[in-house]
Amino acid sequence: MTNKDENNPSIERVDDIPVIYGLLERMGIQAIMDSGIKPHGNWLGLSPGWVITLWLTHILSEKNHLMEPVQQWVRRHLFTLTRLSGQPVRELDFTDDRLAICLRELSESDVWQEIEDQLGQRLIRVYDLKTDRLRLDATLGTVHHDPENGALFRVGKTKSGLYETQFKVMLASLDPLGLPLVVDVKPGNDADDPLYLPSYRRAKKMMLRDGILVVGDSKMSALLTRGTIAAGHDSYLAPLADKKDEPALLSQLLEAWLERKAEALRVFLPEDLPADDSTPDPNLAIARGFEVTRSRTVMVKGKEATWDERLLVIQSYSYMKSMLAGLRQRLDKAEAALLALTPPCQRGKKQIREEAKLLSAIEQVEKQYRVQGFFQYDPKEEVTERRVRAYKDKPAHVERQVRYQVTVSRNQPAIKTAEFEAGWRIYATNESTERLSLSQAVSAYRDQIIAENVFRRLHGKMLSITPLYVQREDHAQGLIHLLTLGARVLALGDYLGREALAKDGNELAGVYTGNPKRSTSRPTTERMLRAFDGINLVIFPPGSHHSTYLTDLMPVHERILALLGLRRSLFSCL
């Protein structure tokens, strides 16, 4: 905290600010922003590019994207930010109004796409990033905004099956870096399938090459999406949504495979393969599979596209075990629920007296536990008659009462088929076997965790795209775009640190709190930034023997700066 007494030294917390600023500087964020955003003629002070650069520094350092605290933060770090940027930084450059104008500019599609194009091409060129693999995926953000007052925050179905007010973020990221190239913010009720092609086209334009392998989840497996990628001289890898589009395909492929009596290829993790090319231990296999080829045709922009597609039929052993355990659990619960529909005649036990109601109840249980076709039923009507004597003006009569009893048995052939198909999944690709073997395809798709790492950061403590406190949709869209720039900074830091360590064959120690001797070859940017906590700058009043004093950098700090390719003068200039 800065001391307000001008006769006494003041202190500014420096911490990781120079490191974050150095990464943003290397990415060229300020120049790219100023080339894309043209401020109003009445704009005074720092340019929008400088405002956004220093605001991003605040977001990543403070782990807070609220606009309100930015001006106060700038006031507390005025000397540090002025020295780093070389600009006449004023706290009034960071009022809520100024920040809101920046968000409105970032929300404009043409402005944002121009910024992304320049930034993506710069990162690929400057850091010589590999551009042979692209990963497409989407994430959801749940908000508490009124869905009736705009077009972005809309009610849609979440992954849990519930309906909530939300928005969608579609990302195209370089694989295996996990570095976003293209970001599209869409309404929460938009279907996922149509979101893939626009992101693919924009990313391909940025990457300036053919032969890209595009990896995605089952929502990317729409035939038109696959055909467009194939027609664009690129390749795709995605699990088929066969249960929805081709429900009998898996059974047909497995049946044909059994008839051929062909040996399945075992799949191993790279670290489990012997270094001498000898036969690996079969017990270490994580999956097995086989493949077939078929021809596909679809109309792409009015032209017929035809290509050969490989279907990789793969059974994951861990997935198989979890599916079998889940199936058995659902069968047991469903059987108990089915038997409970027709309890014995006892006090307090409700009886079903109409066959239609019994069949409807059975259908609900099957749907609840997803056991359609796994049980056989024998419903029986039970009728009891009781003679009732005449009473007053009511004549004697026979009272007839009906109840239904059902016998439940398991459909063993259907269950055995389901058990056999457990863990199997179909992946589609048009990549050649030479460039993508079955084992390589499994490894490529298992890297899906990389895309999830991007989402983890966006939803995590440092960036936190939810909750969103801004109410205007253009402000929200601009803020989400801004936060994805932060995700790029973190991904780039990961890449630089890990590439440098791999080149040296060393590991980095001193980034684990409470365990300084622990080292890693894959440090995250978050851990490296955290290592700079506690660096302070003392600013002496005019006329003192010294002007400033900075906490000494430790060897771990020097090492991190070297790994990230940042100059030491980021600190010494203070």
Image (cartoon, rainbow, N blue to C red):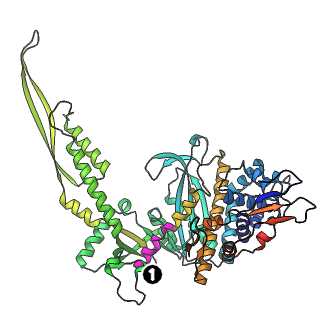
**Up-down: is 547 above or below 383?**
below
In this view, 70 is above or below 252: above
- Which of 380 and 271 lies nearest the eye of the viewer? 271
- The structure residue drawn at horizontal position 56% and vertical position 74%, both measured from the top left corner, is 519
Residue 90 on the magenta span:
no
Q: Position of residue 131 (x, y in %)?
A: 58, 76
Direction from residue 521 to residue 362 in the image, left or right: left
Q: Which residue is mark 1?
A: 432
x, y percent for residue 18: 74, 66
In the displayed structure image, the side of residue 543 where residue 550 appears, left or right: left
- Start-end of magenta stretch: 429-449
Residue 336 x/y as whole percent? 22, 47
Q: Is residue 372 visible?
A: no
Amino acid type at image mark 1: Ser
Q: Quadrant of residue 534?
A: bottom right
Q: Is residue 51 visible?
A: yes
Nearest the viewer among 558 and 277 is: 558
Residue 295 % position (x, y): 39, 75
Q: Going by the picture, which residue comes out furthest to the top?
A: 392
Residue at the far right: name it: 543
Residue 430 inside the magenta-drawn segment: yes
- Label 1, residues with CA under 10 Å away: few <14, some 14-19, many ≥20: few
Nearer to the camera, 517 or 502: 517
Image point (78%, 73%), residue name: 569
Left or right: residue 266 versus residue 166 is left
